[in-house]
Amino acid sequence: MDVAVELSFYPLQQDYLPAIRRLIDRLQAQRQLRVESTSMSTQIVGDYGLIMQLLCEELREALGTAARSVVILKLVGPLEGTSGTGVRPAAPAN
């Protein structure tokens, strides 16, 4: 089952950009997922199990290296008519 996750990571420290960049780079290394970043969040689309495993590992790493952080996650799914890499979330039904 494919899902979409929106992730915002806010390290509460003076030099916060390296921690954010490191997390985004590690997420983007996963070629089985679609990962796109904006100035406020990173969107991850793909298999639910793969995304959850990846987030478990990478957030543990990110939270372990920052003094204190806030992480905001939004999860949408299942995505209809998708089959992995390169999928887009389905438009909401009216």
Image (cartoon, rainbow, N blue to C red):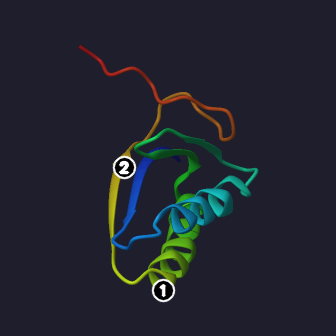
| Vertical position of residue 75 compared to residue 88: above or below | below
Q: Amino acid at mark 2?
A: Leu
Q: Position of residue 16 (x, y in %)?
A: 46, 66
Q: Front-most of 24 and 74? A: 24
Q: Report helix, strand or loop for mark 1.
A: helix
Query: Can you identify the residue that label 1 sits on?
Result: 64
Residue 87 lies, with reference to residue 31, above or below; the image says above
Whole-Å distance between the Cαs marked 1 and 2?
Answer: 23 Å
Tell us which disc is closer to us: 1 or 2. 1
- Where disc 2 sits, the SS reads strand
In the displayed structure, does residue 91 sit left or right of residue 56?
left
In the image, residue 32 lies at what x, y percent? 73, 50
Q: Nearer the viewer, residue 90 or 68?
A: 68
Q: Residues within 10 Å of mark 2 (few under 14, many from 20)?
A: some
Q: Residue furthest top?
A: 94
Which quarter of the rendering shows the C terminus? top left
Where residue 34 appears, as percent x and y from the top left, is 64, 42
Q: Residue at x 57, y 66 (%)?
A: 18
Give the crowd class for mark 1: few <14, some 14-19, many >=20 residues within 10 Å. Answer: few
Identity of the residue drawn at 66% across and 41% down:
84
Decide: marks 1, 2 in contact (CB < 8 A)?
Answer: no
Which of the two residues, 77 or 33, is positioned nearer the viewer here? 33
Q: Look at 72% across and 56% down and name the residue there.
A: 30
Please tell me whether residue 58 is drawn above or below residue 88 in the rendered image. Answer: below
Q: How many marks?
A: 2
User: Residue 35: percent from the left, percent from the top?
Assistant: 61, 45
Upstream in the sequence, badge 1 or badge 2?
1
**Which of these two is toward me, 65 or 36?**
65
Find disc 2 in the rendering and name its residue.
Answer: 75
Mark 1: amino acid: Gly
